[in-house]
Protein backbone atom coordinates (compact mmCIF):
# COMPACT_ATOMS: atom_id res chain seq x y z
CA UNK A 1 0.00 0.00 0.00
CA UNK A 2 2.95 2.32 0.68
CA UNK A 3 3.93 4.63 -2.14
CA UNK A 4 5.79 7.88 -2.60
CA UNK A 5 4.00 11.18 -2.97
CA UNK A 6 5.09 11.50 -6.60
CA UNK A 7 3.69 8.03 -7.36
CA UNK A 8 0.44 8.93 -5.64
CA UNK A 9 0.21 12.18 -7.59
CA UNK A 10 0.78 10.33 -10.87
CA UNK A 11 -2.00 7.92 -9.98
CA UNK A 12 -4.27 10.82 -9.06
CA UNK A 13 -3.63 12.60 -12.34
CA UNK A 14 -4.28 9.42 -14.33
CA UNK A 15 -7.47 8.58 -12.45
CA UNK A 16 -8.90 12.06 -12.50
CA UNK A 17 -7.99 12.93 -16.09
CA UNK A 18 -11.03 11.33 -17.75
CA UNK A 19 -13.52 13.06 -15.47
CA UNK A 20 -11.64 16.33 -15.00
CA UNK A 21 -13.55 18.30 -17.62
CA UNK A 22 -16.89 17.18 -16.21
CA UNK A 23 -15.84 17.96 -12.64
CA UNK A 24 -14.57 21.39 -13.69
CA UNK A 25 -17.90 22.11 -15.32
CA UNK A 26 -19.75 20.98 -12.21
CA UNK A 27 -17.50 23.10 -9.98
CA UNK A 28 -18.18 26.25 -11.93
CA UNK A 29 -21.94 25.76 -12.03
CA UNK A 30 -22.65 24.19 -8.62
CA UNK A 31 -23.04 25.96 -5.32
CA UNK A 32 -20.04 25.82 -2.97
CA UNK A 33 -19.97 22.88 -0.60
CA UNK A 34 -18.58 25.19 2.10
CA UNK A 35 -18.73 28.97 2.31
CA UNK A 36 -17.11 31.10 4.99
CA UNK A 37 -18.35 34.69 5.13
CA UNK A 38 -16.41 37.17 7.31
CA UNK A 39 -15.80 34.62 10.07
CA UNK A 40 -14.43 36.13 13.28
CA UNK A 41 -13.37 34.48 16.52
CA UNK A 42 -11.71 35.82 19.65
CA UNK A 43 -10.52 34.24 22.88
CA UNK A 44 -10.70 36.92 25.53
CA UNK A 45 -9.02 40.01 24.11
CA UNK A 46 -7.11 38.03 21.47
CA UNK A 47 -8.72 38.08 18.04
CA UNK A 48 -7.69 34.85 16.33
CA UNK A 49 -9.83 35.02 13.16
CA UNK A 50 -10.25 38.51 11.72
CA UNK A 51 -12.78 38.15 8.92
CA UNK A 52 -12.14 34.93 6.99
CA UNK A 53 -14.05 34.50 3.72
CA UNK A 54 -13.57 31.77 1.10
CA UNK A 55 -15.52 29.05 -0.69
CA UNK A 56 -14.79 25.38 -1.32
CA UNK A 57 -16.37 24.03 -4.49
CA UNK A 58 -17.43 20.45 -5.24
CA UNK A 59 -14.51 18.04 -5.76
CA UNK A 60 -11.91 20.53 -4.52
CA UNK A 61 -9.05 19.71 -2.17
CA UNK A 62 -8.17 22.91 -0.33
CA UNK A 63 -5.10 23.06 1.90
CA UNK A 64 -5.17 25.47 4.83
CA UNK A 65 -1.61 26.57 5.55
CA UNK A 66 0.08 29.05 7.84
CA UNK A 67 2.53 29.39 10.72
CA UNK A 68 1.62 28.37 14.24
CA UNK A 69 -0.83 30.86 15.70
CA UNK A 70 -2.20 31.90 12.31
CA UNK A 71 -5.68 30.57 13.09
CA UNK A 72 -5.76 27.25 11.22
CA UNK A 73 -6.81 25.08 14.13
CA UNK A 74 -9.42 27.56 15.32
CA UNK A 75 -10.90 27.80 11.84
CA UNK A 76 -11.11 24.02 11.54
CA UNK A 77 -12.82 23.84 14.94
CA UNK A 78 -15.36 26.46 13.86
CA UNK A 79 -16.19 24.49 10.71
CA UNK A 80 -16.54 21.33 12.82
CA UNK A 81 -18.75 23.14 15.39
CA UNK A 82 -16.24 22.58 18.19
CA UNK A 83 -16.04 26.37 18.54
CA UNK A 84 -18.76 28.97 17.98
CA UNK A 85 -17.94 31.92 15.78
CA UNK A 86 -18.32 35.41 17.24
CA UNK A 87 -19.42 36.92 13.95
CA UNK A 88 -19.88 35.92 10.32
CA UNK A 89 -21.46 32.81 8.84
CA UNK A 90 -20.39 29.34 7.73
CA UNK A 91 -22.59 27.62 5.16
CA UNK A 92 -22.58 23.91 4.41
CA UNK A 93 -24.49 23.80 1.15
CA UNK A 94 -27.71 25.69 1.89
CA UNK A 95 -27.41 25.30 5.68
CA UNK A 96 -26.10 28.10 7.87
CA UNK A 97 -24.27 25.95 10.41
CA UNK A 98 -23.54 28.98 12.59
CA UNK A 99 -27.26 29.50 13.19
CA UNK A 100 -27.88 28.48 16.83
CA UNK A 101 -31.15 26.86 15.73
CA UNK A 102 -29.35 24.49 13.36
CA UNK A 103 -29.40 20.76 14.18
CA UNK A 104 -25.78 20.13 15.15
CA UNK A 105 -25.99 16.32 15.09
CA UNK A 106 -27.41 16.45 11.58
CA UNK A 107 -24.69 18.86 10.47
CA UNK A 108 -21.94 16.67 11.95
CA UNK A 109 -23.29 13.70 9.99
CA UNK A 110 -22.59 15.74 6.85
CA UNK A 111 -18.98 16.53 7.82
CA UNK A 112 -16.33 13.85 8.25
CA UNK A 113 -13.34 14.70 10.44
CA UNK A 114 -9.91 13.08 10.77
CA UNK A 115 -7.49 14.40 13.38
CA UNK A 116 -3.72 14.21 13.81
CA UNK A 117 -4.12 11.69 16.61
CA UNK A 118 -6.11 8.74 15.34
CA UNK A 119 -8.46 8.76 18.35
CA UNK A 120 -9.28 5.08 17.99
CA UNK A 121 -10.61 3.31 21.05
CA UNK A 122 -7.89 0.81 22.04
CA UNK A 123 -10.35 -1.68 23.57
CA UNK A 124 -12.48 -1.88 20.41
CA UNK A 125 -11.83 -3.71 17.17
CA UNK A 126 -11.35 -1.83 13.92
CA UNK A 127 -14.92 -2.68 12.91
CA UNK A 128 -16.38 -1.40 16.17
CA UNK A 129 -14.30 1.80 15.97
CA UNK A 130 -15.62 2.50 12.49
CA UNK A 131 -19.27 1.77 13.30
CA UNK A 132 -19.52 3.29 16.79
CA UNK A 133 -20.54 6.86 15.92
CA UNK A 134 -22.92 5.76 13.16
CA UNK A 135 -24.76 3.53 15.64
CA UNK A 136 -24.60 5.62 18.82
CA UNK A 137 -24.79 9.16 17.44
CA UNK A 138 -26.57 8.81 14.11
CA UNK A 139 -28.80 5.90 15.18
CA UNK A 140 -27.99 3.51 12.34
CA UNK A 141 -29.00 -0.10 12.92
CA UNK A 142 -26.09 -2.47 13.44
CA UNK A 143 -26.52 -4.41 10.20
CA UNK A 144 -26.50 -1.25 8.10
CA UNK A 145 -23.45 0.09 9.94
CA UNK A 146 -21.56 -3.20 9.62
CA UNK A 147 -22.28 -3.47 5.89
CA UNK A 148 -21.14 0.12 5.26
CA UNK A 149 -18.04 -0.28 7.42
CA UNK A 150 -16.92 -3.46 5.67
CA UNK A 151 -17.39 -1.77 2.30
CA UNK A 152 -15.19 1.11 3.42
CA UNK A 153 -12.54 -1.15 4.96
CA UNK A 154 -12.44 -3.11 1.73
CA UNK A 155 -12.06 0.12 -0.22
CA UNK A 156 -9.00 1.16 1.82
CA UNK A 157 -7.43 -2.31 1.85
CA UNK A 158 -8.19 -2.94 5.53
CA UNK A 159 -11.04 -5.46 5.49
CA UNK A 160 -8.72 -8.23 6.67
CA UNK A 161 -8.03 -6.10 9.77
CA UNK A 162 -11.70 -5.68 10.74
CA UNK A 163 -11.26 -7.77 13.89
CA UNK A 164 -7.83 -6.39 14.80
CA UNK A 165 -7.24 -3.87 17.57
CA UNK A 166 -5.49 -0.50 17.12
CA UNK A 167 -2.27 -1.60 18.85
CA UNK A 168 -1.92 -4.32 16.21
CA UNK A 169 -1.85 -1.73 13.41
CA UNK A 170 0.83 0.60 12.07
CA UNK A 171 0.32 4.35 12.30
CA UNK A 172 -0.61 4.51 8.63
CA UNK A 173 -3.14 1.71 9.06
CA UNK A 174 -4.67 3.45 12.08
CA UNK A 175 -5.00 6.68 10.11
CA UNK A 176 -6.68 4.81 7.25
CA UNK A 177 -9.17 3.36 9.76
CA UNK A 178 -9.82 6.88 11.05
CA UNK A 179 -10.50 8.02 7.49
CA UNK A 180 -12.92 5.12 6.97
CA UNK A 181 -14.72 6.10 10.17
CA UNK A 182 -15.02 9.68 8.92
CA UNK A 183 -16.53 8.45 5.64
CA UNK A 184 -19.20 6.29 7.28
CA UNK A 185 -22.05 8.75 6.75
CA UNK A 186 -20.93 9.69 3.21
CA UNK A 187 -20.13 13.27 4.23
CA UNK A 188 -20.39 16.26 1.92
CA UNK A 189 -17.14 17.63 3.31
CA UNK A 190 -14.10 15.86 4.74
CA UNK A 191 -11.90 17.77 7.20
CA UNK A 192 -8.34 16.51 7.56
CA UNK A 193 -6.63 18.17 10.51
CA UNK A 194 -2.84 17.62 10.45
CA UNK A 195 -3.35 13.95 9.60
CA UNK A 196 0.25 13.39 8.48
CA UNK A 197 2.04 15.05 11.39
CA UNK A 198 2.50 11.85 13.41
CA UNK A 199 3.57 9.69 10.46
CA UNK A 200 6.98 8.85 9.03
CA UNK A 201 7.69 9.85 5.39
CA UNK A 202 6.67 6.51 3.86
CA UNK A 203 3.33 6.60 5.66
CA UNK A 204 2.78 10.21 4.57
CA UNK A 205 2.95 8.90 1.00
CA UNK A 206 0.43 6.20 1.88
CA UNK A 207 -2.03 8.74 3.27
CA UNK A 208 -1.49 11.02 0.26
CA UNK A 209 -2.45 8.09 -1.94
CA UNK A 210 -5.70 7.78 -0.01
CA UNK A 211 -6.43 11.50 -0.29
CA UNK A 212 -5.77 11.31 -4.03
CA UNK A 213 -8.19 8.41 -4.37
CA UNK A 214 -10.84 10.20 -2.32
CA UNK A 215 -10.52 13.28 -4.52
CA UNK A 216 -10.83 11.18 -7.68
CA UNK A 217 -14.08 9.79 -6.27
CA UNK A 218 -15.48 13.29 -5.84
CA UNK A 219 -14.78 13.90 -2.14
CA UNK A 220 -14.55 17.57 -1.18
CA UNK A 221 -11.70 18.11 1.28
CA UNK A 222 -10.41 20.87 3.54
CA UNK A 223 -7.09 19.93 5.11
CA UNK A 224 -4.91 21.81 7.56
CA UNK A 225 -1.31 20.68 7.31
CA UNK A 226 2.31 21.58 7.96
CA UNK A 227 3.41 19.14 5.24
CA UNK A 228 4.26 21.53 2.41
CA UNK A 229 5.11 18.84 -0.14
CA UNK A 230 1.85 17.09 0.70
CA UNK A 231 -0.11 20.30 0.17
CA UNK A 232 1.76 21.22 -3.02
CA UNK A 233 1.07 17.86 -4.65
CA UNK A 234 -2.39 16.98 -3.29
CA UNK A 235 -4.26 20.29 -3.15
CA UNK A 236 -6.13 22.11 -5.89
CA UNK A 237 -5.97 25.34 -3.93
CA UNK A 238 -4.00 26.86 -1.06
CA UNK A 239 -5.51 29.20 1.53
CA UNK A 240 -2.63 30.73 3.48
CA UNK A 241 -3.47 32.30 6.84
CA UNK A 242 -1.29 34.88 8.54
CA UNK A 243 -2.22 36.59 11.81
CA UNK A 244 -5.86 35.61 11.50
CA UNK A 245 -6.44 36.86 7.95
CA UNK A 246 -6.12 35.29 4.49
CA UNK A 247 -2.72 36.26 3.10
CA UNK A 248 -3.00 34.23 -0.11
CA UNK A 249 -5.69 32.20 -1.89
CA UNK A 250 -4.75 30.44 -5.12
CA UNK A 251 -3.31 27.35 -6.74
CA UNK A 252 -0.25 25.72 -5.15
CA UNK A 253 1.90 27.12 -7.94
CA UNK A 254 0.51 30.64 -7.54
CA UNK A 255 0.85 30.70 -3.76
CA UNK A 256 3.86 28.51 -3.03
CA UNK A 257 6.02 29.06 -6.11
CA UNK A 258 5.10 32.38 -7.70
CA UNK A 259 3.87 34.73 -4.94
CA UNK A 260 5.55 38.12 -4.93
CA UNK A 261 4.57 38.81 -1.31
CA UNK A 262 7.81 38.98 0.71
CA UNK A 263 6.25 37.40 3.82
CA UNK A 264 4.79 34.55 1.79
CA UNK A 265 8.10 33.92 0.04
CA UNK A 266 9.93 33.92 3.39
CA UNK A 267 7.43 31.45 4.88
CA UNK A 268 7.78 28.93 2.06
CA UNK A 269 11.55 29.41 1.85
CA UNK A 270 11.81 27.28 4.99
CA UNK A 271 10.27 24.30 3.19
CA UNK A 272 11.08 22.26 0.14
CA UNK A 273 8.51 20.58 -2.08
Image (tube, helix red, strand yellow):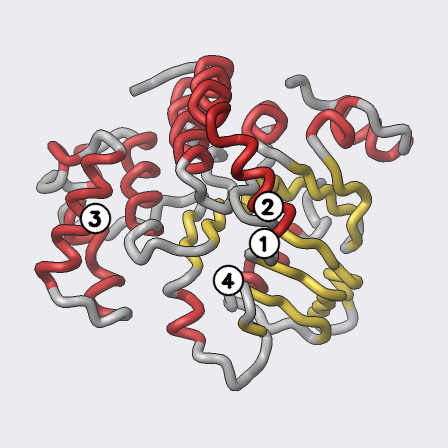
Question: Disc 2 on helix, strand or loop?
Answer: helix
Dot label at residue 122: 3
Q: Are the residues tagged 1 and 2 within 8 Å (C-beta)?
A: yes
Q: Earlier in the sequence, mark 3 or mark 1?
A: 1
Residue 220 x %, y %: 50, 46
Tag 3 secondary structure? loop
Q: Pointer 1: what residue?
A: 30
Q: Secondary structure at mark 4?
A: loop
Residue 149 appears at what percent x and percent y? 19, 48
Mark 4 surroundings: few (<14), some (14-19) or many (≥20) residues within 10 A: some
Secondary structure beneath disc 1?
A: loop
Query: Disc 2 designates what residue?
Result: 27
The reply, left or right, for residue 198 in relation to residue 256 is left
Q: Check disc 4 and report the residue beneath it.
A: 80
Which callout, 4 or 1, points at the residue further toward the start of the chain? 1
Image height check: is 44 above or below 225?
Answer: below
- In the picture, the quarter occupied by the C terminus is top right
3D distance between C-alphas at marks 3 and 1: 41 Å
Amino acid sequence: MNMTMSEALTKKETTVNDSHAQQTSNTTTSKPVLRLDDVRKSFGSTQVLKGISFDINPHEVVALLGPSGSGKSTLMKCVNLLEQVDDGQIWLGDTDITDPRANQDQIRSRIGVVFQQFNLFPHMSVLKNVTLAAIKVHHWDKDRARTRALELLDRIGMRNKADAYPDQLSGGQQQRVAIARALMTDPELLLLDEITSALDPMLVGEVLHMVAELKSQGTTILMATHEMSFAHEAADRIVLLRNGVIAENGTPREVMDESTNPETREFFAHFRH
